[in-house]
Each structure stands twice: as structure tokens, then as C-alpha cells.
Image: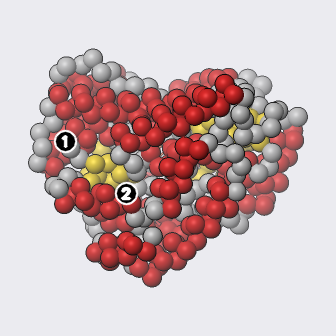
Amino acid sequence: MSDYVQMWKDLGMDLQTHDALCQVLPTAFGDVYLSQENRPQAMGFWDFVVSEIHGIRPSELIEAQKQGQKVFGTFCVYVPDEVIIAANGIVTGLCGGSQFWVPGGEKVLPKSTCPLIKASVGARLDRTCPFFRIADMYVGETTCDGKKKAWEILGEDVPTYIMDIPQMKREKDIQKWADEIAEFTKVVEDLTGNKITAENLNAAIHTINERRKALARVFEARKSQVLPISGKDALLMMQIAFFDDPARCAQMSNKLADELEQRIKDGVSVFPAGTKRILLTGTPLAIPNWKLHHLIETSGAAVVCEEMCTGTRYFENLVDESQTTLEGQLMALAQRYLKTNCACFTPNTGRIEDILRMAKEYQVDGVIDVNLKFCCLYDTEGYTVEKALKKSGIPVLGIETDYTDTDAEQLRTRIEAFIEMLG
Ligand code: SF4
Ligand code: SF4
């Protein structure tokens, strides 16, 4: 990635510290990803993106900025990409998934904050991630307490707009979210200088729906007993989806889905017949957090689905494309986004129903409920999740972890015992 040194300098990055990150990533990726056998050929696209992760997409974003486009950095699947894209803006996900950034976050946040928040703040304040440098505006949300306070700190450094997300899903909450999205349209219009109309919003809704459908096709292939793709590879596709151009993401994911569907017809599986199938549920796994998938898939099982924001929550449910007025479209957006089931809502019975449905659809043998350390919301909801699974006779293992590798061997022992118990 050395060709991008001048770009990183211009972005005001700390090159010395950033070099340390650039040195470890290729080895980590090689160990976790390139060591897999019989991967779908289409994964070459995502391998390439990772090999250029701090270069190729950032340089595209900077080029777009030179042409007058604005880049919005987001941290949550409730922020509607459609509004930004309608105004010819660009969305990039910003959640940090590496321990590398955590100490930087701990300089200003309590240690007892979840690693995703600490890494995100550290990536910005330590100036070691180009995406965090490029974004013209951050868009936060009032989902969990840790994030709410983190926005105040990030807001000192970069323009930050906060969307006030409801905590319940009554009719009046859906209306409130539609109003909040309407206010967001004004903010996006002001920054981009472009008016959001029923026409451009309709086109943006279509673009994002197409991305959802493409990602869903890949997940559909994972329901097959002939497993044409590893959980690790599917996770990588999801993680990069947050950063990539949505139309290209849809195109490449459709290409991957074509290959997977052919593999199923040809009986090409990346795991031996009878490999135990695991559904992962819980907190998001932001790039490059591949720890659990790697542990599970090198312990004799396969991850076949993620009920997570870096999984089904990102693409399930389409926005109604039949609305012709802005008002109708904003309500359609609010309705779709509030179908997503995050533990920040109460009650959150929809998530339990989703997990039980997915356990059936993906023919899983067991569920691993994973919680990022210090995420009080998902930790607490784990009680309800595990109770419901046990009641349905589905084996479940609850795990709490962070981004370090210190617990890897202990986790491996527990995961192996769980897989063995599945018979
Ligand atoms: S877990 Fe909740 S707060 Fe975090 S990205 Fe997902 S929806 Fe947003
Ligand atoms: S994992 Fe939990 S604590 Fe961390 S950002 Fe998401 S909801 Fe907040």
C-alpha cells in the first residue's frame, strides 16, 4: 500500500503508527483467510479490497470530494443510507474492529466501554484510519449509552450530527423516526448543496434495495446443506459492504451468489458433509474482527449465518419502492428501518423471533450468542435469547469477548466442547 503515502500525509495521518498497522494486517489476513481451501473464485475481489484497504477506496472517496461530493461516516445500521445517496453524497461505515485502535480510545473513554466504541474513537483521535480522516461529517445515533457519550468527544474533533432513535416500536415511534429522517434530509441537503426530491430518493431506495437483495442471495446459498462458502468469507463480504460503493457491492455480491448457486448444483462444499452448522447472534463484528469465525471454523464447525448488524440485520426487509411522494418515502424508510431488531429497543421480541426463524432456515445445529465485553444491552438480552433457544431445544453457548487474543485458547476449548456436545 506504499503508493498511498502522500495521500495519508495529506490526510494528516500519523504515518509511523499507521505503518505498524499496515505491517500486521497482511499476515493476519493470510493466516485467517488465505489459508482456507477451495474458496469461491469471486472472493478474489474482496481479497484485493483488503490488500488495498487503506488505499483504494479512500482514494476514490477523495477523488469524489474533489468533484464536489460529500462523505458521511456512519456507525449504525439505523442511519438511512438512502437519504445521503439521494443527495449525491457517499456513505462509509466507520465502526472500528481492531484492538490496534483500542488504547487510543481508552485515553478518553472509560476502560469499561465496549471495544467497538473505543476502537472507533481511537481510530479517529490517533489519526491511523484514512476513512475517519476523510469523512466530512459523522452521523451518530442514540442507540446505546457508550455511543451517545462518544459522539460528544468525537464532535469536538469533527462535525457530528446525531439522529435521535426511538427506543420502542409503537406507531408513534415509527412516526417519530420518520420525522427524524425528515430532519436528517435537511442536514444532508445543507452539507451537499443538493435538494432531495421524490425522484432522487426513489432512485436511492432502489439502489440500496438492490444491494440488500444481492447480499441476501449470498446468505440464501448458506442455507444449503452443500455449503459453498465459509462463514469467514461471507463475513468479509458483509464487512466490506459498509465501505464500498453500493452499486459495485451489489454487482460483486451477485457475481459471488451466481458462483455459489452453481457450486450447490455441482455439489461443491467447502466443509466435509456432516460439519456442524452454527448460527452466530449478538453484537456486530466490524472489520477486521474475524476472531470468532476463525476459532469456530478451525474447531470443526461452520458458521452458516450471522444474526448481527454485520449480517442479516443489514439486508433483511426492503424499503417499499411504490411511494411517489417524499412524505410517503420517508415513512417507508422509517417502517423498514424500525423492523431491524437491535438490543437497544424494548421490548425486542422481534430479535428472538428472528433467531428462532433463522435457526430453522439455516438448518443450524447450535447457536453461539456472542457479546462484546461491556456491551450491557446485548449481554442482558442474552438471558432472553438463551432462554428462548433452550425452550426450543436448540443448543446455545454464550460467549463474551473483546478484540484481544488473550482469551483465544480458552474460547477454543469452550467452542470445541460445545461442538462435541452437538454430537
Ligand atoms: S448493534 Fe445496535 S447500535 Fe450497534 S450497529 Fe447494530 S443497530 Fe446499531
Ligand atoms: S456493541 Fe453494544 S455497547 Fe458496543 S456500540 Fe454496539 S450496542 Fe453499543
Please indicate whether residue 360 sits to the left or right of residue 253 in the image.
Answer: right
Of residue 97 and residue 175, the one placed in the foreground of this image is 97
Of residue 81 and residue 65, the one placed in the foreground of this image is 65
Mark closest to the chain's N terminus, 1 or 2: 2
What is the image's colouring? secondary structure
Evaluate if marks 1 and 2 touch, with contact meaning CB atoms under 8 Å apart: no
Q: Is disc 2 placed on a helix, strand or loop?
A: helix
Q: Position of residue 273 (x, y in %)?
A: 81, 33
Q: Quadrant of the N terminus?
A: bottom left
Of residue 360 and residue 173, the one placed in the foreground of this image is 360
Residue 301 drawn above or below residue 265 = below
Q: Residue furthest top?
A: 322
At horizontal 78% and vertical 25% (from top left) the residue drawn is: 393
Numbered tag placed on residue 347 in the rendering: none
* Label 2: how many Cα within 10 Å (few below 14, some 14–19, many 20+): some
Q: Is disc 1 placed on a helix, strand or loop?
A: loop
Q: Which residue is under mark 2?
A: 57
Q: Which residue is under mark 1?
A: 87
- Looking at the rendered structure, the kind of residue marked 2 is Arg
Q: Position of residue 167 (x, y in %)?
A: 41, 36
Residue 289 visible at all: yes
Please indicate whether residue 229 sits to the left or right of residue 202 in the image.
Answer: right
